């Protein structure tokens, strides 16, 4: 019933300009210290003011957040939300490209994005307001990741937020899937990457000759070479899913040689090379839930990886590494559990919140829009009944660009239907 | 410094003496060739016959050395009644002696102050593949699915268990004390399960829960029909026909052996390893643990169980249990599920986080399970998710009730609820001390006792078990 009212309210207000005042809550702007009894004003989809002494404009829709916690919308930086509905049904799974010769750089996973995926609403209802959609393994270069706001319209923020690939026989870099490109040894992968980057540079410098077919043979398609130009020019970061410490070192060496901006994904043993990562200012996307030597690349896998990395000064963002289905689009929301677990294993609470808000926003170049509660940022705001990392906490109100997006999910409708047995109501809505 | 490994050696050397030593005492044993020859010639091993409750691979588990221990001033979730605030629990000789507002602690007891902390029974996971699918996941050690025939009741999960799987050592750090290792779900009938204590061991026999009944794995739906699409079954109706054929053969087998075992007249019937397991199910000596997602399929399986006169003990992965909670309650079938795995295949499409809360609300026995070595370490958190989902739909679940989902209810599913799963006098002292409320994301299992022996202590490296595999491969500080 509560859901229905909220849904109607959202529908009634639609996209019209409006002012929302969230008052009395403990506000965590992330970009600054927490504010007791703070107010957040959202106007026309943007945050207009955040502070303890902010007056509520006349006519504002007021949400009393007394006793509640207010944070930026949460970001899960490695998902397949919207590009994978039922994993085992191939017609609903658009997260990978076959590529050629280990390279699928021109593949933009976001081209398959379905804004009507039933898995988006459960994520929103748990306070996730942005995700990074990452292509899945298919060689050394998987394709391009996209940054998405879980808004009611115009969800795609950046179709290409990073290039994605892997090094070493990464077996479980993120989520459930993985598996190194069959047939490649480490040396072959390194050789392939160097060949590829050389060819991209050659192509970029000789496009006209290439188009006249006066170029030496290049090892990737024109579309793939084109897609990799911003990578070798250091404008688009390359997320390499890589776990073993020695493989991380090798990935750092190769990318450094070509001026590629590296982001380490997975990074099971990143803690072993933390000082080097910190010195090179290479961010790491990793989780806190895994402590199992799942493969010979992950022998040093540990819960406190992220805490150790942060301690060494590495910029980190949390992603799901809970294994099996914990990394699935159904469980984008479990980034809250990752954050709580990272705190249980040594990260400070503030750092954990940053690792699922501002840190990924910075890593993916969208910190001017999302990730913190500051005037001028998008109105991605969540009001929580308590500590957002606790299981007992509910997201009371969720705004994306100033619009309430909390509404019943397909799962909510099923639960409502079967709450009363033996004969559930099979009628509408 | 390395107390735990010492304990392991002691338990093995002292507690399982070789038969020759038993007979001859300290004198060097002389091989008695005549006796040996005579035994093999005149009397075949018990494997020649099909006897109910045969136990050819018996448990050699012995509790580890324990100290009389009292935990005081803790919040105790007993799984047998209301929460005891500021309560105490006394363990001695492997058993729980007393639980209550106060207990009479003997002078020699180790006293642990539980102020601000919680105590629960050891967590029980009815669905694991640890040991059969060990870490690291390499083909050479992938021993969980005998996917060579759709009906393999003849395989036993224990024969695949690698006791040095590093996942076992991490399991206890999540407060888990007993697990059921099941064959995988490729097959209609997958084989026997192994009920194991989560303890360091050289052999699987040393991990086997003494006196536990075997379980038998069965699987519904997509997995068997996908794996055997080429040879069949390739449809759900093919799946049903496959089970029914097996039960028909099993009933005939049971009848002929029960008759022969009663009168010993004539030649014994021919022994069949697979039918023997099925016959034991029909006799009620083995508990059926069935992987089944969809509500409508579970209802058909229940009809089949009536057709052949057996009982399904628990449905596992039953993401749609919430649709038939009333039926499960009526049939006294356990509902084992995850908190939030869903949508990875069509039969998981209707997964809801409130599943266990709804099932519990309908009066059926709800329980959490993992099917995953990571989820296994945080079953308390998975329960917390299901509680939260329940609260969100107006079905609040108390901690007293929710703790049962990971303790006494799974103990019941294994037929061990008279021994483990709750904190009551005379039960096995499988106990977890939590740093705070176990349903908080911040809680750690601080200390874990199995049969009264402290086998895990988060604050003491000497009480953190490292498997053979961990040594040298896994940095010491990482293996926790």
Image: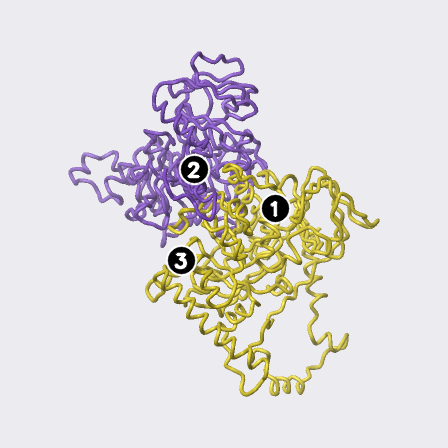
Circle count: 3
Which chain: purple? Answer: A
Q: Is residue A6 above or below residue B214?
A: above
Image quarter (top left, top right, bottom left or bottom right) of the N terminus of chain A: top left
**Residue denoted by label 2:** A122
Secondary element at tag 2: helix
The answer to whether dots 2 and 3 both sit on one chain is: no
Instruction: Name the residue: 48% across, 18% down.
Output: A50
Residue B119 in view, yes or no: yes
Quickly name the residue at label 1: B403
- Chain of residue at mark 2: A
Residues flagged by tags 3 and 1 on a common chain: yes
Say which residue appears at 53% left-offset and 53% top-offset: B329
- Chain letter, disc 3 residue: B
Q: Are marks 2 and 3 in contact (CB under 8 Å)?
A: no
List x then y, in percent, for residue A195.
Answer: 31, 44
**Callout 3: SS:** loop
**In the rendered image, the vertical position of residue A340 relative to residue B265, given as above or below:** above
Q: Which residue is mark 3?
A: B221
Q: Chain of mark 1?
A: B
Horizontal arrangement in the rendering, residue B429 relative to residue A144 (left or right)? right
Depth order, front residue of B453/A423: A423
Q: Residue at x 61, y 40 (%)?
A: B443
Alpha-carbon span between mark 2 and mark 1: 26 Å
- Marks 2 and 3, how far apart at CA: 26 Å
Residue A204, horizontal then vertical, whole percent: 26, 34
Q: Position of residue B120 (x, y in %)?
A: 66, 47
Judging from the image, what secondary structure is the residue with disc 1 in? helix
Q: Which chain is yellow?
A: B
* Camera-side residue of B421 and A286: B421
């Amino acid at each position: 019933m509560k859901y229905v009212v909220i849904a109607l309210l959202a529908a009634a207000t639609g996209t019209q300009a409006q002012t929302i005042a969230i008052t009395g809550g403990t506000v965590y702007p992330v970009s600054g210290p927490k504010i007791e009894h703070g107010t957040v004003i959202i106007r026309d989809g943007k945050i207009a003011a955040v502070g303890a002494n902010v007056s509520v404009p006349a006519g504002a829709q007021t949400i009393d957040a007394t006793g509640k916690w207010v944070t930026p919308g949460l970001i899960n930086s490695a998902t397949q939300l919207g590009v994978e509905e039922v994993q085992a049904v191939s017609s609903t799974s658009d997260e990978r490209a076959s590529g050629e010769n280990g390279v699928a750089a021109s593949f933009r996973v976001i081209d398959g994005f379905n804004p009507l995926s039933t898995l988006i609403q459960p994520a929103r209802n748990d306070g996730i307001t942005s995700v990074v959609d990452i292509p899945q393994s298919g060689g050394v270069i998987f394709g391009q990741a996209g940054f998405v706001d879980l808004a009611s319209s115009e969800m795609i923020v950046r179709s290409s937020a990073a290039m994605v690939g892997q090094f070493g026989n990464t077996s479980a870099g993120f989520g459930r899937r993985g598996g190194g490109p069959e047939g490649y040894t480490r040396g072959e992968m390194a050789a392939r990457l160097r060949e590829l980057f050389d060819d991209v540079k050659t192509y970029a410098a000789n496009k006209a000759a290439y188009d006249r077919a006066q170029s030496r043979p290049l090892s990737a398609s024109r579309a793939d070479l084109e897609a990799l130009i911003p990578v070798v020019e250091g404008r688009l970061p390359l997320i390499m899913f890589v776990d073993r410490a020695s493989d991380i070192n090798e990935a750092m060496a190769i990318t450094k040689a070509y001026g590629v901006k590296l982001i380490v994904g997975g990074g099971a043993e990143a803690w072993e090379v933390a000082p080097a990562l910190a010195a090179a200012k290479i961010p790491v996307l990793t989780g806190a839930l895994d402590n199992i030597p799942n493969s010979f690349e992950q022998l040093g896998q540990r819960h406190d990886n992220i805490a150790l990395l942060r301690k060494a000064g590495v910029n980190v963002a949390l992603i799901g590494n809970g294994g099996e289905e914990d990394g699935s689009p159904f469980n984008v929301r479990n980034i809250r559990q990752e954050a709580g677990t990272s705190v249980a294993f040594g990260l400070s609470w503030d750092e954990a919140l940053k690792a699922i808000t501002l840190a990924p926003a910075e890593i993916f170049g969208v910190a001017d829009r999302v990730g913190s509660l500051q005037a001028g940022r998008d109105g991605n705001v969540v009001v929580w009944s308590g500590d957002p990392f606790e299981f007992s906490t509910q997201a009371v109100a969720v705004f994306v660009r100033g619009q309430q997006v909390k509404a019943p999910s397909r799962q909510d409708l099923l639960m409502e239907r079967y709450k009363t047995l033996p004969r559930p109501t099979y009628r509408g809505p | 410094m390395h107390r735990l490994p010492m304990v392991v050696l002691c338990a093995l050397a002292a507690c399982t003496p070789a038969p020759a030593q038993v007979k001859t005492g300290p004198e060097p044993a002389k091989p008695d060739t005549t006796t040996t020859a005579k035994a093999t010639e005149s009397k075949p091993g018990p494997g020649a016959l099909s006897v109910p409750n045969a136990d050819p691979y018996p448990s050699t588990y012995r509790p580890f050395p324990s100290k009389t221990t009292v935990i005081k001033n803790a919040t105790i979730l007993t799984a047998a009644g209301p929460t005891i605030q500021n309560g105490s629990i006394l363990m001695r000789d492997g058993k729980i002696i007393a639980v209550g507002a106060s207990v009479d602690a003997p002078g020699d007891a180790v006293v642990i102050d539980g102020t601000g902390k919680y105590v629960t029974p050891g967590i029980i996971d009815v669905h694991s593949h640890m040991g059969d699918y060990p870490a690291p996941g390499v083909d050479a050690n992938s021993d969980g699915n005998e996917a060579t025939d759709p009906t393999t009741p003849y395989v036993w999960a224990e024969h695949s268990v690698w006791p040095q799987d590093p996942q076992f050592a991490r399991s206890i750090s999540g407060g888990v004390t007993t697990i059921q290792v099941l064959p995988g779900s490729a097959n209609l009938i997958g084989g026997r399960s192994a009920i194991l204590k989560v303890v360091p061991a050289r052999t699987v026999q040393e991990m086997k829960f003494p006196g536990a009944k075997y379980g038998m794995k069965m699987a519904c739906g997509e997995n068997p029909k996908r794996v055997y699409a080429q040879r069949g079954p390739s449809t759900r109706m093919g799946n049903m026909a496959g089970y029914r054929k097996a039960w028909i053969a099993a009933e005939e087998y049971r009848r002929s052996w029960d008759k022969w075992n009663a009168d010993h007249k004539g030649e014994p019937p021919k022994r069949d390893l697979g039918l023997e397991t099925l016959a034991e199910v029909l006799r009620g000596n083995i508990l059926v643990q069935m992987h089944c997602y969809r509500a409508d399929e579970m209802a058909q399986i229940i009809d089949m169980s009536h057709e052949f006169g057996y009982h399904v003990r628990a449905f596992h992965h039953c993401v749609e249990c919430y649709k038939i909670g009333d039926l499960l309650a009526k049939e006294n079938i356990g509902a084992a599920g995850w908190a939030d795995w869903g949508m990875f295949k069509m039969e998981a499409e209707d997964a809801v986080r409130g599943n266990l809360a709804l099932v519990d609300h309908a009066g059926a026995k709800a329980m959490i399970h993992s099917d995953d070595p990571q989820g296994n370490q945080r079953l308390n958190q998975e329960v917390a998710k299901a509680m939260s989902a329940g609260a969100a739909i107006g079905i609040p679940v108390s901690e007293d009730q929710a703790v049962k989902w990971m303790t006494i209810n799974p103990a019941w599913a294994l037929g061990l609820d008279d021994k483990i799963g709750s904190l009551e006098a005379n039960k096995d002292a499988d106990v977890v001390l939590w740093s705070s409320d176990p349903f908080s994301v911040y809680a750690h299992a601080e200390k874990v006792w199995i049969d009264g022996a402290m086998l895990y202590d988060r604050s003491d490296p000497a009480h953190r078990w490292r498997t053979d595999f961990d040594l040298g491969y896994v940095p010491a500080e990482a293996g926790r």
